[in-house]
Image: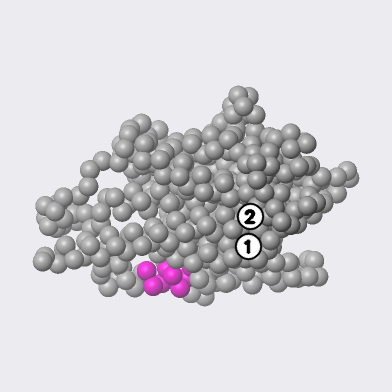
Amino acid sequence: MDISQVTYALDTFYFLLCGILVMWMAAGFAMLEAGLVRAKSTTEILAKNIALFAIASVMYLLVGYYIMYSSDSPIFPSLGFLIGSENTVEAVLAGGDDAPYYSSRADFFFQIVFAGACMSIVSGAVAERMKLWSFLLFAVIMTGFIYPIQGAWSWGGGWLSDIGYSDYAGSGIVHMAGAAAALAGVLVLGPRRGKYGPNGQINAIPGCNLALATLGIFILWMGWFGFNGGSELKISDIDSANNVAQVLVNTNLSAAGGLIAAMIVSRILFGKTDLTMILNGALAGLVSITADPLSPSALSAMMIGAVGGVLVVFSVLGLDKLKQDDPAGAISAHGTAGIWGVMAVPLTNAEATFGGQLAGVVGIFFWVFLASLLVWYIIKAIIGVRISEEEEYEGVDMSECGMEAYPEFTNSKA
């Protein structure tokens, strides 16, 4: 057997395995969000998380993948359908720089799970007061059009790629984009009833199951090794194998740095060790390193994550002061930390520039935010986005799903 066939098979298998790890992150998001909402909102948020992954898969098949990777336009990608043909044996055996080194279907699968991860970020931010079918309708537009268009600007070879924007695995393209869509949804929805009082009063609404939330972070932490490691795209030569190892080491240490920093800051600010801040600190560390998990040293990666962990604490507190209700802290962990991660790339990567990175942040954020805001308002005008005050009091589980996640333990409403 020709060696090119062996390396093709190995890189394809590695790519698929990483995609499976990223798909497992969907479970992490579901557990994290289910733990951070009230018991009466658990069923609905689980329904959102599993349904959005199915929607992302279908929409990416129909239009999303073509828009992101098959258009020649640098700004407005052309509309197209389905995912094209598979690589041929002849193309692989031809060798050279243009020869494919993994299956195109593996690439499609890997890109699907990224689109699903982006949409999962929105779910936690709009939890406990949004209509389920309004959310799912937005997921159709987000995963089929909004996310792929800005993805085409960079990973698809568009204008951001042309000016040197660098985002290895998607701190901006995936995470900040999801946070921008989430922020637009939160602005349209408004806060949960009772979250904010007069004179700037902020009322804590504790989650129902911090054990589930912690499990969610462990799952996300594990899945992130596929998220960042798979973005190396291959493992079949010495340089690529070494790169993958460096990426995984840096991913882990950035998460650890973010967690420890958030833990220390929360202790200083609150006099207590706030578990929810610890969890979001780890998540912020993971997001922060995702823009470039390869270039930094292990120590630098830890420091990049630590800055993200500090930022996420103050971002969560700042959004509360602005009365923007985000039950999962998703806008802060993915948005604030995502911006930091993108802007930190030139600190360790000489090929990136602060100007190119800033252009990426501004371009991606405003496109996703404004497009999402428009879609949210259209959905609001057509079918509405928010459940009634009575339904919110009774719980979105019963009003939207007709069942409770913990029927034995919810005789009184949480």
Q: Position of residue 167 (x, y in %)?
A: 44, 54
Residue stretch in magenta:
244-251
199 w.r.t. 383: above or below: below
Q: Is residue 273 visible?
A: yes
Task: State the residue position of label 1.
Answer: 212
Which x, y percent locates residue 388?
74, 34
The image's mark for residue 34 is: 2
Label 2 is placed on what type of residue? Ala
* Callout 2: SS: helix
Question: Magenta stretch: residue 258 in it?
Answer: no
- x and y percent of residue 395 in the render? 72, 44
Residue lying at 27% horizontally and 60% vertically, measured from the top left: 12
Q: Amino acid at mark 1?
A: Leu
Single out the residue that lies furthest toward the front.
408
Residue 317 in view (yes/no) = no
**Could you classify mark 2 by the number of other residues whose Cα lies within 10 Å: few (under 14), some (14-19), or many (20 or more)?**
many
Residue 364 relative to residue 101: left or right? right
Among all residues in the image, which is located at the extreme top? 382
Q: In 3D space, how far apart are the residues under numbered discs 2 and 1 (Cα atoms)?
A: 7 Å
Q: Nearer the viewer, residue 289 or 133?
A: 133
Look at 70% across and 67% down and name the residue there: 275
| Crowd class of label 1 (few under 14; some 14 to 19; many from 20; radius 10 Å) | some
Q: Magenta: predominant secondary structure element?
A: helix
